[in-house]
Amino acid sequence: MVLLAGPVMGQTPPSRQGFDIRVGAAPAPVRIGGQTRLVHELQLSNFAPTALEVRRIEVIDGATGQVLTDLQGSALDAALGGSRTVPASAFVLVYLEAPVDGPAPDRLRHRLTFAGPDGRETVVENGEVRIDRAPLPLLGPPLRGGPWVAVYQPDMERGHRRVAYAVDGQARVPGRFAIDWIKVDETGATGRSGESRLDGNLSFGAEVLAVADGVVAATRDGVPDPADLSGVDRVALEDATGNYVAIDIGGGRYAFYEHLSPGLRVRPGDRVRRGQVIGALGFTGQASGPHLHFHLSDAPEPLPAEGRPYVLEGFRVVGRYPSIQAFGRGEPWDMATEADGEGPSFPAHNVVVWFEDPPTVDR
């Protein structure tokens, strides 16, 4: 860690306990909507005997020194997901998305400005990480037709990306690139008004498709769907996925599908082809309504795995919601703009897409 606050001539520079700065999973350049971003988390641990206030965070090109992201004010609050004050001996995750114009840098470093109870600022640099330049997996549609909403929002307090799990001695973020896919109609409704039956929901029962050729690595089956849309009781952490399928698509990557209906069409060891039906969209596990939870990770386990980026093709952006709140209120969605992007890319949050129907694949 390099102390950047300069000393007065002839004096020993003051030393103070501060933050340990680390980066979790190495970021990879991923096109989200119409912009390339470096999605990652900064891990800050306060080793001082008092609380410290985070005042500024800069994400820097490790080779050129160019500042890619400068977080202050409300942007810093959003990245921290709460208070800027970190108590003594506490740990906080900072959620970062550094935009990249042109070629991505080879490495990043991070500059942190913080202050103690006396208000004196200290500036330090650390958290250097090399960019993961492995080619991103190119995936096909997980569903057919549409319109489907890519429900996620990076700054949601308890959104998938902001939930870390330390179930085996290491903290990981499996849902870093998770999307909840929910079907709507042209008015933004997810089903018939006032209808409580599952068969009145537009998403429930939709065929779920393999996004790539691969081998089924793990499944869970037999969890029943609830009787109606009134919701499910809170379940244990290990049961939150409901019925699921994990497909080994090669390269140390696993496609994860959660909350499926019972009666999966595949079993561990089965070889599947892109576009093959593997199950039906359901309402099992911890879910507020029928939807397909989909993410890519580096292990065939729901929790002890790092979520990894991917590129999706075979979809057309037709609109978007300005926020998850607007979607939750059942408001109509807006028409698409150029900024919403088209495939192949990682769909921007809350966009409304139409999936191309892949060729029918028989087992």
Image (cartoon, helix red, strand yellow):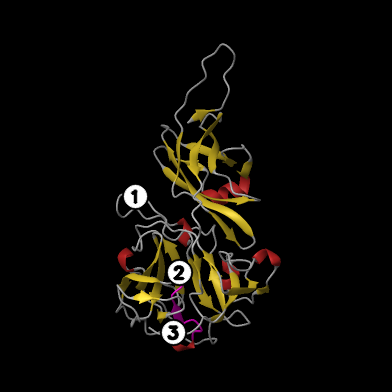
Q: CA distance from mark 3 to mark 2?
A: 16 Å
Question: Which residue corresponds to mark 3?
Answer: 205
Which residue type carries mark 3? Gly
Residue 94 in view here: no
**Mark linked to residue 180:** none
**Mark linked to residue 294:** 2
Estimate the x, y position of residue 276 in percent, counting from the top left.
43, 80
What secondary structure is found at the residue carrying circle 1?
loop
Which residue type carries mark 2? Phe
The magenta-colored residue range is 201-211
The one nearer the camera, 332 or 151, is 151
What secondary structure is found at the residue carrying circle 3?
loop
The C terminus: image quadrant:
bottom left
The one nearer the camera, 335 or 254, is 254
**Mark linked to residue 170:** 1
Instruction: Specify the quadrant of the image occupied by residue 63.
Output: top right
In this rendering, position of residue 114 left or right of residue 33: left
Estimate the x, y position of residue 301 in percent, counting from the top left.
33, 63
The one nearer the camera, 194 or 357, is 357
Tell me which secondary structure the magenta stretch mostly adopts. Answer: loop
Residue 62 in view here: yes
The relative height of residue 55 versus residue 161 in the rendered view (above or below) is: above
Q: CA distance from mark 1 to mark 2?
A: 23 Å
